[in-house]
Image: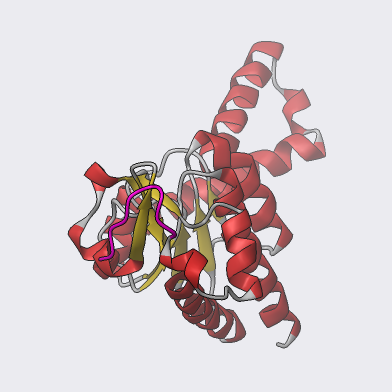
Amino acid sequence: MIQKNDTTKDKEEERVLSQTEKSMMEAGVHLGHQTSKLHPRMNKFVVGIRNTVHIIDLEATQARLEAALAFISQTVKNRGVVLLVGTKLPFQKMVQEISQACSMPYVVERWLGGTFTNFNVIKKRIDYFKELKKQKESGAFEKYTKKEQAVKGKELADLERKIGGLVTLEKIPEAVFICDLIKDKACFRESRIKGVRVVALVDTNVDPLIVDYPIPANDDAISSVKYMLEKVRDTIIEAKSSN
């Protein structure tokens, strides 16, 4: 790892950046965590220090992103499913909108234990939610008393919040895209148990070797996560159009 003081140019500034790297830099993808939080295995993805913050090698990020997107594209072309996961509060709406734009399932609330490892139970809840929603839309709720309607309405809203993003999930997905491995470590653990391939952003405080397709990137900044999610969205849409 090359360490520099704040007055020394970073390696990223000394070479000519590609257009993709410039776009990533504008989005803040290169900004890691404080130096005290560095995971030793992220050394090879760090090119310098600026204001006590590690700087991520965008050349490596571009290469890893391209590999991840190629995998996602092939998965979708094979009619596989990619579940997008981002439960950090600032990312929830963005993850939901991008997932809906490419017609993929998503999780933006707390990861429900057993989503993969006990999928049969989760699938029953999904089916129940869909049936309850259908009843409300058809006016079937009107046969109940106001109190019963209120109870069912509350139950429907609760299910919408917890599993609304999983309504299209008929089986365990082939892959997951995780915005923050530390925040959503429960999803990562279940993915490992069930053999689901993991694509994830790995910030400087994360072990990149535990992920199938790690993408070295800032996982805190909305602009950085948005940049990556939009690349995933576009890749999925393009792959679907070729089927």
Residue depicted at 72% across the width and 39% down the height? 135
In the current view of this chain or complex, which residue is farthest to the front? Answer: 7
Residue 108 within the segment the image draws in magenta: no
Q: Is residue 8 magenta?
A: yes
Residue at 42 percent across and 61 percent down: it is 10
Q: Is residue 7 above or below residue 230?
A: above
Q: Which quadrant of the figure contains the C terminus?
A: bottom right
The residue furthest top is 147
Q: Is residue 88 visible?
A: yes
- In the rendered view, tell whether residue 25 sits above or below residue 162: below
- Picture coordinates of residue 235, whole percent (x, y): 65, 75
Magenta region: 1-9
Q: Residue at x 56, y 36 (%)?
A: 90
Q: How is the image coloured?
A: secondary structure
State the quadrant of the N terminus: bottom left
Q: Is 44 positioned to the left or the right of 176 in the image?
A: left
The structure residue drawn at horizontal position 23% and vertical position 43%, both measured from the top left corner, is: 36
Tell me the quarter of the picture where residue 140 sits. Answer: top right
Q: Is residue 133 left or right of residue 200?
A: right
Q: Position of residue 192 (x, y in %)?
A: 27, 66
Q: Is residue 59 above or below residue 49?
A: below
- Toward the viewer: 217 or 167? 217
Camera-side residue of 80 and 89 = 89
Q: How many marks?
A: 0
Secondary structure character of the magenta stretch overall: loop
Residue 239 locus on image (x, y percent): 67, 81
Report x, y in % for residue 16: 57, 75
The image quarter in which residue 24 lies = bottom right
